[in-house]
Amino acid sequence: MMKKLGLLPKLIIAIVLGIIIGSIAPQWVIRLLATFNGIFGNFLGFAIPLIIIGFVAPGIGDLGKGAGKLLAITTGIAYISTIISGLTAYFTSATLLPIMLTPGSLAINPENPEEALLSGFFNVEMAPIFGVMTALLLAFTIGIGISVIKGDTLKNFMHEFQEIIEKMISNIIIPLLPYHIAGIFANMTHAGQVATIMSVFAKVFAMIIALHIIIIIVQYLVAGSVAGGNPFKLIKNMLPAYFTAIGTQSSAATIPVTLERTKANGVNDGVADFVIPLCATIHLSGSTITLVSCSMAVMLLNGKAVNLAIMFPFILMLGITMVAAPGVPGGAVMAALGLLETMLGFDQTLLALMIALYLAQDSFGTACNVTGDGAIAVLVNKISGFKLKE
């Protein structure tokens, strides 16, 4: 039965079971779950550099193919849209989250050890093969190299490596994730923190979905004013793609619908055929809004400093690192784990909390991504010299 359930229902069940276990189970059961969490968290730490190389290098390498100037224009617009979305999320979160949440309410008081998260019975070290920054630099170097050389050997190797990493995520990390989340919530319930977390889920989700809607309207207001189309009619035509993405949780899996609806908006067939598949991998405005908002909420709750000097470089790197996040649910947050760890100082517990927060609304972030792809196609259509067809 569980195998037939989607990831979101499994996560909800895991959270509920974790709260129940944390409320009634003896301490040794919590420590047993904490042991699994420690091992899984260490494996995740080992996998993060491999995930970065597996996603980013072939993603950047593939950008070398295509229509030269049109490729550069589309990539530039997609990146600017992603950064604007991230900054919108930052300023909104910086304004609203301190009012909605209690800063420092999840920070453990060392004078009350009974409130601390329990540790596992033992730990298995799994040191990553290299650091996250090394992985990023290596991925950029390989990706740029693939895009400029004529040979296909390295490109084919990196695509096969990407397939291995996608299999690792879809066959190992994603199936074990609900157990990891259950263990985290059991431990937090035992430490008396779960009421705060559940309150955060509701408040932050409402803010994120409102931001998704606002950014879609802004994208189409800009595209419509430049291309001479009615922005709300353009949005209405894209709604089937929006709702399809909610079901698939994958920009790549939604491409056929996004493509059909973009052409229905009057975009030239050739432009749509080029822009939509490309933007499915490089335009992640909704995912960026979610990651920025959720990470700021987690940082505030744990008493960490949150300011533009910290978050702006993180947003800039997100726009690059999430390139070609795979079609599996949660691909964007998996690609961002390294940045959360190195740039924002997240430990394994906070990374698990981020994964839970992100995946619980992954559908809506993906829907925002693909709907925005249609707006970029309208802009590129105008820049290419075409008018919207009736």
Image: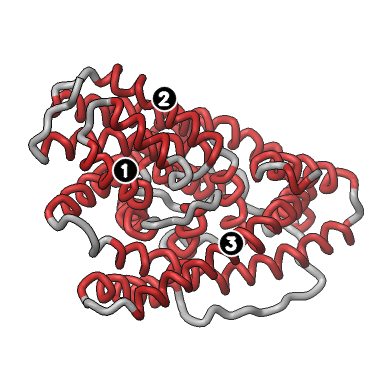
Q: Amino acid at mark 1?
A: Ile
How far across and down, in percent of the image, does residue 269 sit? 24, 37
Q: Say whether residue 182 is left or right of residue 63.
A: right
Residue shown at 90% from the left, 50% from the top: 25
Asked if residue 334 shows in the view, the reply is yes
Please say if 339 is above or below 132: above
Mark 1 lies on residue: 276
Residue shown at 30% from the left, 67% from the top: 61
Residue 169 disc label? 3
Mark 2 lies on residue: 239
SS label for mark 1: helix
Of residues 343 and 361, the one drawn nearer to the viewer in this rendering: 361
SS label for mark 2: helix
Asked if residue 94 shows in the view, the reply is no
Cα distance in 3D space between marks 2 and 3? 30 Å
Residue shown at 30% from the left, 63% from the top: 62
Which sits earlier in the primary sequence, circle 2 or circle 1?
A: 2
Circle 2 residues within 10 Å: few <14, some 14–19, many ≥20 = some
Q: Amino acid at mark 3?
A: Ile
